Amino acid sequence: MANATNTPTPARRFIKRQEVESITGLSCTEIYRRIAADTFPKQVSLGPKCVVWIEAEVLAWCDERIAESRGEAA
């Protein structure tokens, strides 16, 4: 799908907490601790008992951690 300027629209994919844990290696507690500290992407509420994360935001966070650990600009 493309927008009016004919550039591709990035695909959004929702992922659940278990997948966030798998991608990042962080525990559930640490994920929520970092969200509270505003150092991790916030979840999106889909309903009263369902929250998800946007995959691209989690992957961007991972890329930033890699760049930081190697002394590179993100």
Image: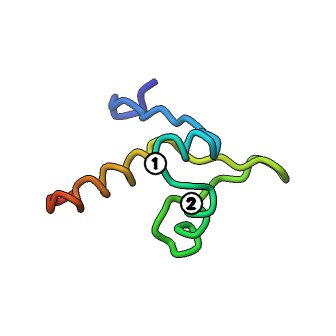
Residue lying farthest top? 1
Image-based side of 44 in relation to 49, left or right: left
Which residue is painted at 26% across and 53% down in the image? 66
Asked if labels 2 and 1 touch by Cβ distance under 8 angstroms, the answer is yes
Q: Mark 2 points at which residue?
A: 31
Amino acid residing under circle 2: Ile
On the rendered image, what quadrant is the C terminus found in? Answer: bottom left
Residue 65 position, x and y percent, is 31, 57
Residue lying farthest right? 48
Q: Is mark 1 on a helix, strand or loop?
A: helix
Image-based side of 49 in relation to 37, left or right: right
Amino acid residing under circle 1: Thr
Q: Which of 24 and 14 is in front in this view?
A: 24
Residue lying farthest bottom? 37
Image-based side of 5 in relation to 32, left or right: left
Q: Mark 1 points at which residue?
A: 24
User: How many neighbours does mark 2 have within 10 angstroms: few (below 14), some (14-19), or many (20 or more)?
Assistant: many
Which residue is painted at 42% across and 35% down in the image? 10
Q: Which of 74 and 1 is in front in this view?
A: 74
Q: Earlier in the sequence, mark 1 or mark 2?
A: 1
Residue 58 position, x and y percent, is 46, 49
Q: Which of 20 and 29 is in front in this view?
A: 29
User: How many neighbours does mark 1 have within 10 angstroms: few (below 14), some (14-19), or many (20 or more)?
Assistant: few
Residue 16 position, x and y percent, is 64, 41
Which residue is painted at 52% across and 68% down in the image? 34
Q: What element carries label 2?
A: helix
